[in-house]
Image: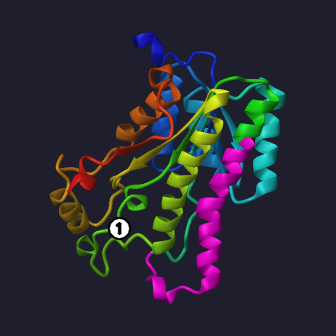
Amino acid sequence: MLDSFDLSERVVVVAGGAGLIGPAVCHGLADHGARVVVADVDRDAGEAVADAVDGEFVRCDVTDATAVEALFDHVVDTYGRLDAQVNMAYPPDENYGRRFQDRSIEEWAEQVDNGLNSYATLCRGALETMDTCGQDRGSLVNFGSTYGVQAPDFSIYESGETPPTPAHYSASKGGILNLTRYLASEYGDRGIRVNAVSPGGVFDDQDPAFVERYEANTPLGRMADPEDIAGAVVYLVSDAAEYVTGHNLVVDGGWTIK
């Protein structure tokens, strides 16, 4: 059974590999033998992650379709194959805590474009690359969120502390989850599995009062560590999940069961 987690010789691109959860995911994949390509807009952080996992860094702004195309062209030219694609980039929102009615429709459209349509561009590029390389199998893992599954609990947020998750984030993540299911259905007969991971709240030095309220509403009694999420990604990429597709693996300490 342990052999089914062996990713030796497999090429895995991690889009957003230098973010909060990305380094743990890259380390988890590399620890199981994968050749990891870290794709991120942050060169310094991305190169540090790539060096740490003996992988490669490719600078890529996932909101730029030309940059995404160049990423996959590089993968084909360098490796001649793409075994798995992990999409976890989340383009920053400088007005993260702004309420729904305080955002212009132009800002809403821009953020949904960044959050949802960038994933569609990445999925399209990965699927085309697998076709170009003549592969009859592959794995895509998209990052959703518990807030793509259910609405936020606004009682855990207070003014001046950690800002509430914006509406466009929930809308985008919900769209990503249904895109995942759609692609799983369409590409299953080609041996390509498409799944999602939906993390709960990940600890990132948030306001202590917010953390206390969040953890009080979580059955396992704590926020997630990045390593908690990495194991789920390794599983979905590996042959241990070879009969799993169209699934949303929620890793939230039980938050969504309440």
Which segment did they paint magenta?
97-125
Residue appearing at x 44%, y 28% in the figure? 235
Query: Dot 1: few (<14), some (14–19), or many (≥20) neighbours within 10 Å?
Result: few
Judging by the rendered image, the residue that carries numbered circle 1 is: 151
Residue 41 appearing in the image: no
Please name the amino acid that badge 1 sits on. Answer: Ala
Q: Is residue 161 above or below residue 200?
A: below
Q: Is residue 121 magenta?
A: yes
Residue 135, image x, y percentages:
73, 23
Q: Main secondary structure of the magenta part?
A: helix
Looking at the rendered structure, the secondary structure element under dot 1 is: loop
- On the image, the x and y values in percent for residue 206 come to 32, 63
Give the camera-side residue of 34 and 123.
123
Q: How many marks?
A: 1
Looking at this view, is 246 or 64 the one in front? 246
Q: Nearer the viewer, residue 17 or 238?
A: 238
Against 201, residue 208 (above or below) is below
32 horizontally vs 258: left or right: right
Which residue is at 52% across, 77% downward?
95
Which quadrant of the figure contains the N terminus?
A: top left
Q: Residue at x 33, y 58 (%)?
A: 205
Question: Which residue is drawn at the image coordinates 28% and 69% (left, top)?
Answer: 153
